[in-house]
Image (cartoon, rainbow, N blue to C red):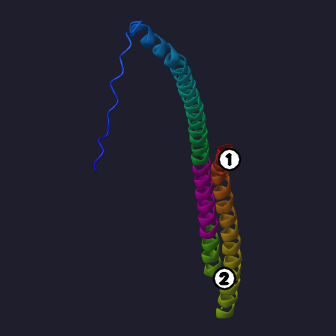
Amino acid sequence: MATAIKKPAPAAVAPVAQSPEPKIEKTVEAFSAPIAEIQDNVRKALEKGVADTRAAYAKAKAAAEETSVALESSRATAAKGVVEFNTKALEALRTNAEANFDFLKALISVKSVSEFVALQGEHARKQAETITAQAKEIAALSQKVADESAAPIKSQIAKTFKLAV
């Protein structure tokens, strides 16, 4: 036997006492306060982001300007060093040329082979000592120029990384 399911009778719809407009206004008012707060928070976050970006840009710009100054200083020091190096090399060349001319003058007055051999040996020994001393001077000057040229760049790099950390 099948039992029939009875459906409940439809309830009577109560007449709406108010119009739907006040409910919408209340709903809008209820959401307006949190939305205004959210908008205010978003605005503050964006303003903070813009301020942080400006500060980062100012730091980057200052670091770039300082690096430019350091590179210019390094270039000027290197150019000065190259002039010093060239002067030292020309001085060494002049000294060696004068020593060779003095040797040739002394050779003209040689009377014997033994005197020639002694003069040749003495000249070779003096030239070896002179060239060794000149090489040490030029090497020291090269090191000095390299150190002085790199100093502004090294200083700026250290400063930049110290700021970045």
Side (left or right) of 24 relative to 39? left
Report the label total: 2
Q: CA distance from mark 1 to mark 2?
A: 59 Å
The residue identified by callout 2 is 124
Range shown magenta: 77-97
Is 139 in front, or is 11?
Answer: 11
Q: Which mark is residue 165?
A: 1
Mark 1, secondary structure of its residue = loop
Q: Amino acid at mark 1?
A: Val
Report if residue 111 is visible in the image. Answer: no
Residue at the location (71% across, 77% down)? 129
Is 111 in front, or is 38?
Answer: 38
Is 4 in front, or is 56?
Answer: 4
Looking at this rendering, what residue extends furthest in the bottom direction? 114
Predominant secondary structure in magenta?
helix
Q: Which mark is residue 52?
A: none
Q: Residue 88 appears at what percent x and percent y?
A: 63, 59
Q: Residue 85 appears at what percent x and percent y?
A: 61, 58
Q: Residues within 10 Å of mark 1 (few under 14, many from 20)?
A: few
Q: Residue 3 appears at what percent x and percent y?
A: 30, 45
Q: Amino acid at mark 2?
A: Ala
Is 111 in front, or is 50?
Answer: 50
Side (left or right) of 153 relative to 33? right
Side (left or right) of 20 relative to 146? left
Q: Residue 25 appears at what percent x and percent y?
A: 45, 10
